[in-house]
Image (cartoon, helix red, strand yellow):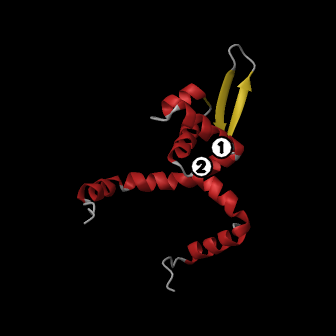
Amino acid sequence: MEKLITDEKIVKAWDDICKVLNKDHDALKSDILNHVGNKWSLFIVHALGIDGRMRFSALQDHVNGISQKMLTKCLRELERDGLVSRSVYAEVPPRVEYALTDLGIGLLEQVTPLWLWIANNIGQFKDARANYTPITPV
């Protein structure tokens, strides 16, 4: 079978990844990719990475279109995996703030090239969508 990727560094990196993330880790890989890779989690990581520590309501305002229920779910998943920290302050009323952990900052550093790729190719995406003709069933 012909390899699609020929860059030796990338091929070696994938070989190394496959050695560490073998079938024994399939459930963990799937779980992390399902919630870290969803659009809301990436927007939350971006917001906390760019604007820093935030309260729930400020974060909800920052992530356009997210419901309270979805924000709560995503924050819990990100906190469970060590990407986001939750700080509760004993004040009246209680204050809760969220921030990226070092692991979360590492994720932001890894997805930034993806955001840049989207930004650099936004015109091509718009053109492709404008020129797309869906196939209608016969």
> Which disc number belongs to residue 77?
1
Seen in the picture, residue 13 relative to 38 is either above or below; the reply is below
Query: What element does badge 2 sit on?
Result: helix
Residue toward you, 98 or 1: 1
Q: Is residue 5 left or right of residue 76?
A: left
Say which label, 2 or 1, has the lower sequence index: 2
Q: Quadrant of residue 71?
A: top right
Q: Is residue 22 visible?
A: no
Going by the numbered disc 1, the residue's amino acid type is Glu
Q: Is residue 101 visible?
A: yes
Quarter of the image that includes the C terminus: bottom left
Q: Quadrant of residue 87?
A: top right
Q: Position of residue 120 (x, y in %)?
A: 38, 55
Q: Are marks 2 and 1 in contact (CB under 8 Å)?
A: yes
- Dot 2 crowding, Cα within 10 Å, few <14, some 14–19, many 20+: some
Q: Is residue 90 left or right of residue 41?
A: right
Per the image, the residue denoted by label 2 is: 35
Q: Position of residue 127 (x, y in %)?
A: 27, 56
Q: Kindly identify the residue that appears in the image at 24 percent across and 60 percent down.
A: 133
- Dot 1 crowding, Cα within 10 Å, few <14, some 14–19, many 20+: some
